Amino acid sequence: MADQSPRLPRVERRISSAQHRADYAAAQASPMQHKPRLITSRSVQPDVHGGGLVGRFNTWLAVLVTRSVGTMWAAYVFTLIALVGAVALITSNPFLILLVALISQTFLQLVLLPIIIVGQNVISASQDARAEADHITLTTLHAINVQQLKMLEQQQAMLKQQREILDLLQARGITMSTDEPGA
């Protein structure tokens, strides 16, 4: 037996900025006026840490460290640190044990991890801005496509009417001559 309870109205769950909503509405209202925007990491960096010298440096360093740690060379360095720690434990070398502990526990966990998180925040902000710009552009293209489809439907209806008129004229024995200039 089907549930007869009334449907609740649809609730918009997306979170978007007021600027995005305004750009979206403008793109739907007049799609031919839309100009796509190029969004790069540099264009959103001031939003994360500010546009000053210190903010630009912090952003640059965080992204550089994040991209560097995400390479195989960093994996090789971390493997080397782990191997040196294993050798230090096997040989009971207190200096190497302390050195590996200092590098792995202090530097890698307390310093490198927050820098990577900041770098990920910058990269994520640029991806979000790029997604919003792409969404508006795709919405605009969709609106233009819908307009083109309506025009094609109108043309199809006009061609159908012309065909009916030509069929009616032929049925009455009237033919169109194409010998005249401009016909």
Image: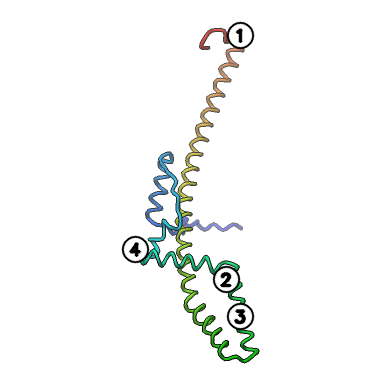
User: Is mark 3 in CB contact (under 8 Å) with mark 4?
Assistant: no
Type of amino acid under label 3: Ala
Amino acid type of the residue that numbered disc 4 sits on in the rendered structure: Gly
Q: Which mark is residue 82?
A: 3
Element carrying mark 1: loop
Image x and y of residue 113, in percent: 49, 74
Q: Report which residue position mark 4 lands on.
A: 52
Structural crowding at the residue carrying mark 1, measured as other residues with C-alpha within 10 Å and reported as few (<14), some (14–19) or many (≥20): few
> Disc 1 or disc 3, which is closer to the eye?
3
Give percent across and percent down for residue 79: 62, 76
Left/right placement of residue 72 relative to residue 38 reads right
Q: Amino acid at mark 1?
A: Gly
Disc 4 to disc 1, C-alpha distance: 83 Å
Quadrant of residue 160 in the image?
top right
Callout 1 touching callout 2 (CB < 8 Å): no
Disc 4 and disc 2 in contact, CB within 8 angstroms: no
Q: CA distance from mark 3 to mark 2?
A: 12 Å
